Image: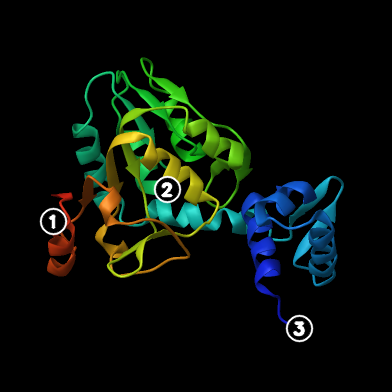
Amino acid sequence: MNTLNNRQQKEVDIINNLHFITIKDLANTLNVSEMTVRRDCTLLASRGLIKQVFGGVTSHIPEKLLNYTVDSELKKNMIIKEKIASKAISLLKPNEVFFLDSGTTAATIARLLPRESSYTIISPSFLAIELLVKLDQSSVICPGGIYLNKPRVFYNQESADFLQHFRAGKCFIGATAFDINHGITCGYFEDVPLKQAMLDCSQERILITDSSKFDKVSTCVFTNITTLTAIITDDGISQVYKDFITSNGVKLYIV
């Protein structure tokens, strides 16, 4: 069996992430013609990698496997994530407007916010939103869009454009990996425009990530150290990274 080319592999990844997408949206995402995408999808379906359905294409991966990544991540380093989240919350001012990224550390912030909190919170994360709506005094803004099963976020290009309309005092951004040479990366390229929009529209840009993510590289670069104002992490971070962060004028919080 011939291997997939780069475009076809991206198509599989996108379909698995979104679980469903129209041919038109898939073509627009990859900036290719609908005819090219239809031809690719016929091939991918014949190999059992996706399914062609009325109105578009859908993943061939059972939903329980699509959800595995987030479910397992929620259980990792739980105590450390709670410490990072608590520090993040301590930096907030009453009635502040802030962006909250996707990811399990961001969801921990949402879980630990006091019930009586009074904030305006803008987030594309379903994990966060289902917790934030329990806050009696806070307003929650969600950009909407297509729901991605793996990272549990709402996304399409309009979602990123929507986020650009807001301005916030802070954003709390997660990452899959942080490498001195290769920058700050995430696992899903659909996350990149959302993260960049939140960073662009915030006065303080705070990375929230545990020390296990340092000295690693993931799929997609979304920013670098120079865009950040602060990083919250745990004491497992190496001295090399401590020096790198502070030498770039970024505030480092160790929990």
- Residue 125 coordinates in the image, percent (x, y): 48, 39
Q: Residues within 10 Å of mark 2 (few under 14, many from 20)?
A: many
Q: Which residue is mark 3?
A: 2
Among the two numbered marks 1 and 2 on one chain, the one whose residue lies closer to the N terminus: 2
Which quarter of the picture shows residue 217?
bottom left
Q: Which residue is mark 2?
A: 103
Which quarter of the picture shows residue 155?
top right
Q: Quadrant of the N terminus?
A: bottom right
Q: Amino acid at mark 1?
A: Thr
Among the two numbered marks 3 and 2 on one chain, the one whose residue lies closer to the N terminus: 3
- Residue 201 coordinates in the image, percent (x, y): 38, 35
Q: Amino acid at mark 3?
A: Asn
Q: Nearer the viewer, residue 78 or 182?
A: 182
Residue 246: image tag: 1
Q: Given this view, does label 1 or label 2 mark the residue nearer the observer? A: 1
Q: Given this view, does label 3 or label 1 mark the residue nearer the observer? A: 1
The residue at 71%/81% (across/down) is: 3
Q: CA distance from mark 1 to mark 2?
A: 25 Å
Q: CA distance from mark 3 to mark 1?
A: 48 Å
